[in-house]
Structures are given as structure tokens and as C-alpha cells.
Amino acid sequence: MKILVGIKRVVDPNVAIHVKSDGSGVETTNIKMTMNPFCEIAVEEALRIREAGNAKEIIVVSAGPKNSQETLRSALAMGADRAIHIPVEETRLEPLAVAKLLQAVTTREQPDLVLLGKQTIDDDYNQTGQMLASLLGWSLGTFASKIKVGDEMLTVTREIDGGMETLRLTRPVVVTSDLRLNEPRYVTLPNIMKAKRKTIESLSAEELGVDIAPRLEILAVEPPAGRKAGVIVGSVAELVDKLKNEAKVI
Ligand code: AMP
């Protein structure tokens, strides 16, 4: 099998988010960035499938500004074989544009499996995998918490309301990873050094024949309302009084 993994560079989940003063988005200048955690899980799963002898090649692909190459290098250091960067200076890349770019790369590379994260933690769209499978006309397994590779198919277990659902999907297939799929490995220093020597192929949106112009307009981005400071009450009677007369919850 050949596996293609889509990865996105996002603000590190441990960093406090600040909304830009003009309300146009979230501040990313001089902010620590990292691979989207669900994408890291997707890369890890591809590595495990290859290590089990079920895949020959793993290609990672990322669309985004030049520094997305650092994220691709991290995936190469984890063990991916090849990387493709789609340079896009547009900071807002909508899921439909990403899905079309991944469709074009899929057509060139002909993988049997495309692994994506279930969602990016910055925009929280949770759309790209679904759109890509539709564009390709491929089977789709979303929110995978377990993947088993069979001869002509893939068995995907996914968490749904009230339990687990197991699907048998014919290949080629798009699968999106959930948090429980695996725990990604730490990259070792020798592998980071090795990854520095690997070349990253660059393919522009024009070369891929994809129009990435935004279709959505963001009207405003606002930080969540600040929480009021708490108070320490002196007695149960005072607590009950506040719940009754201030919070009006009893
Ligand atoms: P989303 O639909 O934006 O929540 O993203 C879901 C998944 O699509 C991510 O976890 C990635 O696997 C993939 N993806 C999103 N944006 C990009 C991008 N710019 N480059 C490559 N893959 C992406």
C-alpha cells in the first residue's frame, strides 16, 4: 500500500491564543507552532501500518506558508518517506481548497489510503476528509479509533454516540483519525538530523490546477468573554442566599 498523509501546521495547543487587535483572526506571528495533534496521530498510524508490513511508502503533504516545511520535516523525522509542500501564502485556506489540493496530489501519487486528522485544532472545521472522499468518490471512515488492514479493504472502528461502530471499507479509502487511535512517538535526534537531509518537493496550487480563492468571509473573530473573579463565602447560609438572589439558580 501507498499512504498519503495530510498535515497542517497550527498554533501549539499549549500556547495562550490572542485574537488580533483588528478582529481579523488569531495572532500567529512569533507564536510557537506545531503539527496539528490529529495529523500527528495520522502520521503515527501510517508508520505503524508500514511497520506491520502493510505499506511500502508514506508521503506527507502540507499546504501552507513556507514554514509548513518545518512541520513536514517533523513528519519525515517521525519516519515518513517523502514530503510535498504546497506553498500557499494565503493564511486562510478553506477545507474545500485543501480537499481539492489533496485530490490533485492523490491523482498524481495514486495512494491506496489517505490518512487525515479528524479536524484541525485552529479552525475546528472537521470537513476536509469528508470533502476529499466525496471529490474522489472513495470510501470514507471518519473518527477512526482503530484501523485494521485487510487484503482489499480496511476495517475501521469509530466512536459514535452510545458505542463503537466497525466498518469494512473497500480501498482506496480516506480515513480521519480520532484521539484514541494511537499515541505518537517522540522523534529521536538522529532521525531529526536524517530528516534535514531529505528533500521536500514543492508543488504549487497552479501546477495542481486548483483555485484556492476563499469562498467564505470571516466577519469577526472575538475572544471568549472573560470570567468574573470568584468569591469565597463565609457560610452555607451566605452561599444559599447568593444562589437565590444573585445567581438566581434556586
Ligand atoms: P479540517 O477539516 O480543517 O478540520 O482538517 C482536517 C484534516 O485535514 C487535518 O487534520 C489534516 O489532516 C487535513 N488538512 C487540513 N488543512 C490542511 C493543510 N493546509 N495541508 C494539509 N492537510 C490539511
Image: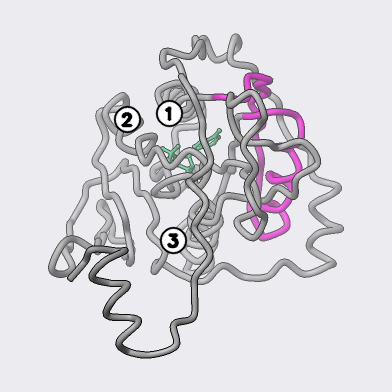
Q: Residue drawn at (51%, 71%), measured in percent from left and top?
A: 183
Gap in Å between the C-alphas at discs 2 and 3? 26 Å
Which type of secondary structure does the marked residue at label 1 adopt? helix
Q: Amino acid at mark 3?
A: Asn
Q: Residue furthest left?
A: 162
Gap in Å between the C-alphas at discs 1 and 2? 8 Å
Which type of secondary structure does the marked residue at label 3 adopt? loop
Viewer-proximal residue, 246 or 152?
246
Picture coordinates of residue 3, whole percent (x, y) = 48, 47
Report the quarter where the C terminus lies: bottom left
Q: What label sits on residue 54 in the rendered view?
A: 3
Q: Is residue 61 above or below residue 188?
A: above
Q: Residue drawn at (15%, 69%), measured in percent from left and top?
A: 163
Q: Earlier in the sequence, mark 2 or mark 3?
A: 3
**Left or right position of 102 against 91:** left
Instruction: Kindly indicate whether the residue at mark 3 contacts the one at mark 2 (C-beta within 8 angstroms).
Output: no
- Which residue carries the number 2 mark? 131
Q: Nearer the viewer, mark 1 or mark 2?
A: 1
Instruction: Kindly indicate whether the residue at mark 2 contacts the one at mark 1 (C-beta within 8 angstroms).
Output: yes
Q: Is residue 236 above or below residue 206?
A: below
- Which residue carries the number 1 mark? 95
Mark 2 Cβ inside 8 Å of ligand 1 = yes
Magenta stretch, residue numbers: 64-92
Q: Amino acid at mark 2?
A: Met
